[in-house]
């Protein structure tokens, strides 16, 4: 497959943004941990002040908007823009943990627990879970960008949409179901790794079936 130089440059620069933005994100977390966990981050979670919670919720929403904006600016069609968004989001999330390892020497293992997201409820889980999902996002997003650049349509079928929705619900549930740990300062229960595997498989199948009926169709 001949790669378009302009598309390759866009992927590189989108990835560079993800790496740099990950450092900004990890820096904020370094300051938050020094404030709320001066002896080192651990569960059970400590309640943040009301003013800080509001700022954190707004910051997380702004983060998603910024990553989406990069995808929109990099792509030229709807699905290609979404592909770039998947790439930059995945790179950002993976390098967030890379930078935390560099700065704080944390996590000590991929099974260490972390707070992953705050909207609409706190998400918690072992570090390996978001990393695996992010790697899949990079692979699928990059594949979308490159194939669409070649003129191949990406048009998900109803089955693809249903599989993707099911994968999302399973993944979100695995991160948010332990309300005692996220909202009531309890130690987290064991993470349901089976749910993670199911969500990854469903995402992969949803992505594959989206190309199945249109692999030979090109944009005129």
Image (tube, rainbow, N blue to C red):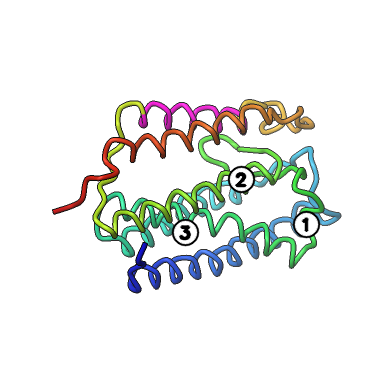
The residue depicted at 25 percent of the width and 47 percent of the height is: 153
For the C terminus, the image quarter is bottom left
Reply above or below: 205 against 153: above
Residue 208: horizontal and vertical position, in percent?
41, 38
Q: Nearer the viewer, residue 36 or 80?
A: 80
Residue stretch rendered in magenta on the structure: 160-175
Residue at label 3? 88
Left or right of residue 213, residue 182 in this image: right
Mark 1 touching mark 3, by CB under 8 A? no
How dense is the environment of label 2, judged by Cα within 10 Å: few (below 14), some, or many (20 and up)? some
Label 1 – label 2 distance at C-alpha: 18 Å
Look at discs 2 and 3 and give the one toward the viewer: 2
Query: Which residue is found at the position 61% from the left and 51% from the top?
Result: 52
Q: Position of residue 15 (x, y in %)?
A: 49, 66
Tell me the distance, in whole angstroms, between the alpha carbons under discs 1 and 3.
Answer: 23 Å
In the image, farthest residue toward the left: 220
Mark 2, residue position: 132
Residue linked to disc 1 = 106
Above or below — where is 44 with respect to 64?
A: above
């Amino acid at each position: 497959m001949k790669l378009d130089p302009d598309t390759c440059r866009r992927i590189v620069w989108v990835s560079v943004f993800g790496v740099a933005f990950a450092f900004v994100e990890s820096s904020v977390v370094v300051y938050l941990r020094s404030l709320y966990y001066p002896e080192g981050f651990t569960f059970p979670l400590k309640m943040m002040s009301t003013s800080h919670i509001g700022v954190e919720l707004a910051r997380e929403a702004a983060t998603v908007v910024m990553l989406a904006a990069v995808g929109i600016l990099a792509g030229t069609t709807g699905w290609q823009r979404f592909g770039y968004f998947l790439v930059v989001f995945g790179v950002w999330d993976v390098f967030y943990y890379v930078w935390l390892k560099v700065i704080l020497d944390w996590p000590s293992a991929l099974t260490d627990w972390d707070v992953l997201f705050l909207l609409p409820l706190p998400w918690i889980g072992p570090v390996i879970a978001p990393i695996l999902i992010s790697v899949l996002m990079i692979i699928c997003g990059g594949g979308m960008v490159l194939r669409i650049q070649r003129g191949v349509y990406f048009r998900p079928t109803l089955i693809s949409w249903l599989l993707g929705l099911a994968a999302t619900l399973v993944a979100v549930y695995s991160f948010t179901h332990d309300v005692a740990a996220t909202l009531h300062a309890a130690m987290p229960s064991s993470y349901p790794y089976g749910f993670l595997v199911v969500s990854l498989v469903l995402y992969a199948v949803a992505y594959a079936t989206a190309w199945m009926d249109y692999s030979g169709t090109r944009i005129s």
